[in-house]
Amino acid sequence: MPALGFGVYQIPPDDTFDAVAEALRVGYRLIDTAAGYGNERAVGEAIRASGLDRDEVFIETKVWISDFGYDAALHAFDKSANKLGVETIDLLLLHHPVPSAFDETIDAYRALERLYTEGRLRAIGVSNFMPNQLKVLREHTEIMPAVNQIELHPYFTQPTVRALNAQWGIVTQAWSPIGGITDYLGDGGPTTFDDETIGAIAAAHDRSPAQIMLAWHLQEGRSAIPKSVTPSRIAENFEVFDIELTPEQTATLYALDTGERGGPEPEVVTRQDFGKTIPEA
Ligand code: NAD
């Protein structure tokens, strides 16, 4: 799996083709989508139109919680594969644990294990799983998740989840890696983009805050999947492989942690509140 990918959350289906096409043109080879984003079809179309071979692009998508349970998750694979227009998906994640229906969460993961064993998935994983949920999952299933995709940016650095991921050999993949969620919340609070400390590190490298945050993830061994629809930013977010942060700068970024997530608390997610239906086509 390429470490740096392109995320397409909140990109409307009509804009997704152009954004993914631009990302592929710039050099991204990992695309992160989800059944819940409603844009898998456009992701598949952009990949086919790119002229790249199927095996040159790593496609990652997610099963939404309304499709948890064994049979429903098997069918969710069919829905996503059909929309993407592929036979195999490179990485399929459970989008979010549902603590109040954890048996169904586990059954959905068992379906992923079966699809993996059958060769229809190249890797399986989870998203937004906290240590207690990972531990229960592991007690009831066979295959270690390859990836745990979690909210992770300088304002929310998730030390406990990162530690367990590292101990178990699970790749930590950062969503909102440049802190987009600190901006979307629109609560008037500070955002990573106008943070003075991040700005000072960026100035020292003559780069942008987004580039510094992405270099931080990569240097710390994480995968990151920044999103943008703006071609100049899509390119900027990929020009990060030459940045070397000092140990002090790395520690300074971790020290910005507020302990407060922007996304929903994993414990409160229920099928009732988060159970939108994923269409067949
Ligand atoms: P992000 O940290 O990637 O921030 C994206 C936003 O930052 C953009 O909308 C834009 O406003 C801004 N931006 C992008 N590039 C910039 C630049 N160079 N300079 C200044 N501003 C810039 O946040 P995200 O979109 O929330 O997360 C990225 C991806 O993670 C998503 O697209 C999706 O694929 C995934 N994700 C997963 C979950 C989950 O529950 N698993 C949740 C949220 C996001």
Image (cartoon, rainbow, N blue to C red):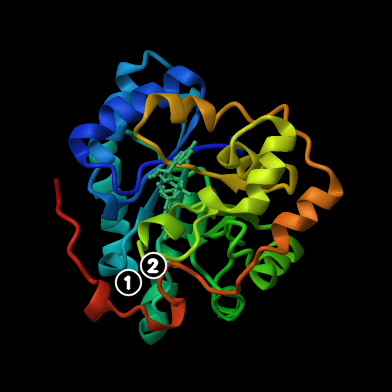
Specify whether 260 is left or right of 87.
Answer: right
Please report the residue visible at 67 percent of the width from the left and 39 percent of the height from the top: 202
103 up-or-down from 142: above or below: below
Specify whether 126 is left or right of 69.
Answer: right
| Image disc number at residue 108 | 2
Q: Give, as a three-letter code, the residue at label 1.
A: Gly
Q: CA distance from mark 1 to mark 2?
A: 5 Å
Residue 78 point in image, percent of width and height:
27, 48
Residue 242 point in image, percent of width and height:
72, 27
252 up-or-down from 156: above or below: above
Q: Secondary structure at mark 1?
A: loop
Residue 192 point in image, percent of width and height:
54, 53
Label 1 sits on residue: 69
Instruction: Tell which circle, 1 or 2, labels the residue nearer the N-terminal end.
Output: 1
Q: Nearer the viewer, residue 230 or 86?
A: 230
Quadrant position of the N terminus in the picture: top right
Q: Give, as a three-letter code, the residue at label 2.
A: Ala
In this view, which residue lies farthest toward the top?
51
Specify whether 244 is left or right of 107.
Answer: right
Q: Nearer the viewer, residue 50 or 20?
A: 20
In this view, which residue lies farthest toward the right?
247
| Image disc number at residue 152 | none
Q: Secondary structure at mark 2?
A: helix
Disc 1 packing (10 Å; few <14; some 14–19; many ≥20) = many
Displayed quadrant of residue 145 = bottom right
Displayed quadrant of residue 139 = bottom right
Please report the residue visible at 45 percent of the width from the left and 29 percent of the height from the top: 234
124 up-or-down from 186: above or below: above
